Amino acid sequence: MIKAEFFTTASGELLGFSMKGHSGSAQAGYDIVCAAVSSAAYMTVNTVTDVLNVDARVAVDDGFLRIRVQEKDARSCRSIFAGFKLHMLGLEEQYPNNIEVSYTEV
């Protein structure tokens, strides 16, 4: 299962997310759930770091991706993080056995 955890402030502002795990919906290379999540997650990270030029903490490993921005940069990242969150909630609704979305206040 893919576990998506969104980092929020006390007021609900998104500061980033982490993704870990594998969906297990098909074998590697044929897993459309994994492809949908991975593509959207990398697009989000690349937009924050390379288009918005926000200095974010990013970590990547097999089956793991995390991005976190400072509170001062949350406003400029608001739309991209909100869009990614909506995408993940839609995928969670379609594939409840493969994706779980949660929130952590930081």
Image (cartoon, helix red, strand yellow):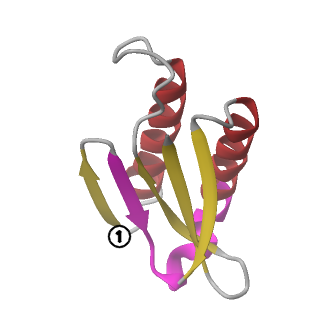
Residues drawn in magenta? 64-79
- Foreground pick, 13 / 63: 63
Left or right of 56? Residue 16 is right
| SS label for mark 1 | loop
Percent across and percent down for residue 70 are: 46, 80
* Residue 67 lies in the magenta-colored region: yes
* Residue 74 lies in the magenta-colored region: yes
Percent across and percent down for residue 11 are: 73, 85
Question: Residue 21, located in which quarter of the rendered image?
Answer: top left
Left or right of 62? Residue 48 is right
- Foreground pick, 32 / 78: 32
Question: Residue 81, located in which quarter of the rendered image?
Answer: bottom right
Q: Which residue does the image show at 37% across and 68% down from the upper left?
A: 56
Left or right of 99? Residue 35 is left
Q: Residue furthest top?
A: 30
Q: Which residue does the image show at 46% across and 16% down from the upper left?
A: 26
Q: What residue did someone put label 1 on?
A: 55
